[in-house]
Image (cartoon, grey):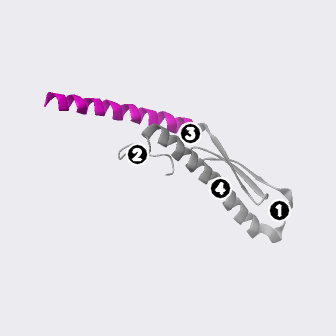
């Protein structure tokens, strides 16, 4: 019985270490930036916390007739940037968790 309790204690310490690593990684991911583009018309920069840092619209896309197309391009650029952010977070998290989806581990912002 004592051996199994020791194993449980070691497992608990390992889980706590992994949780600290996940939290550290989340903080690091929050500082990374990701750029999304759409059709050369819109460019969006977001960070790992999913904050929009900048939006650049090409001057040629700013005619009133093209408003709907421009709105679609901005949405596409945002989706592109957030997809890159999510993929990076997922890949980085696999390095910490060994690819295991662990219940009770803190999730990433917006995921």
Mark in front: 1 vs 2:
2
Q: Compute the Cα span from label 1 to label 3.
A: 32 Å
The quarter of the image holding the N terminus is top left
Closer to the camera, 59 or 102?
102
Query: Which residue is labeled 4 in the image?
Result: 80
The 10 Å Cα crowd at callout 3, few under 14, some 14 to 19, many 20 or more, is many
User: In the image, which disc is placed on residue 61?
Assistant: 1
Q: CA distance from mark 3 to mark 4?
A: 17 Å
Give left or right: position of 104 versus 37: left
Residue 55 appears at what percent x and percent y? 73, 51
Label annotation for residue 29: 3
- Whether tag 3 and tag 2 are in contact, CB under 8 A, the answer is no
In the figure, residue 79 lies in which quadrant? bottom right
Pair 4/2: label in front: 2
What residue is at 46 percent from the left and 36 percent from the top? 23
Residue occupied by mark 2? 100
Q: Is residue 56 left or right of residue 17?
A: right
The residue closer to the viewer here, 104 or 61, is 104
What is the secondary structure assignment of the residue under circle 4? helix
Marks 1 and 3, the one that precedes in the sequence: 3
Closer to the camera: disc 3 or disc 2?
2
When the figure is inspected, residue 69 is found, relative to residue 13, above or below; the finding is below
Q: Examine the rendered structure and indicate whether residue 100 appears above or below residue 12.
A: below
Looking at this view, name the residue that lies furthest to the bottom. 65
The disc, 4 or 2, on the residue closer to the chain's N-terminal end is 4
The magenta stretch is 1-30
């Amino acid at each position: 019985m004592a051996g199994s309790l020791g194993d449980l204690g070691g497992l608990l310490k390992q889980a706590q270490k992994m949780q600290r690593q996940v939290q550290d990684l989340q903080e690091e991911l929050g500082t990374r930036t990701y750029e999304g583009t759409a059709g050369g018309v819109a460019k969006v920069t977001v960070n790992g916390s999913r904050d929009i840092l900048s939006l650049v619209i090409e001057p040629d896309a700013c005619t009133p007739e093209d408003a709907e197309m421009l709105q679609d391009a901005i949405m596409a650029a945002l989706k592109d940037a957030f997809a890159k952010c999510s993929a990076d977070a997922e890949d980085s998290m696999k390095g910490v968790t060994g690819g295991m989806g662990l219940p009770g581990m803190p999730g990433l912002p917006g995921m």
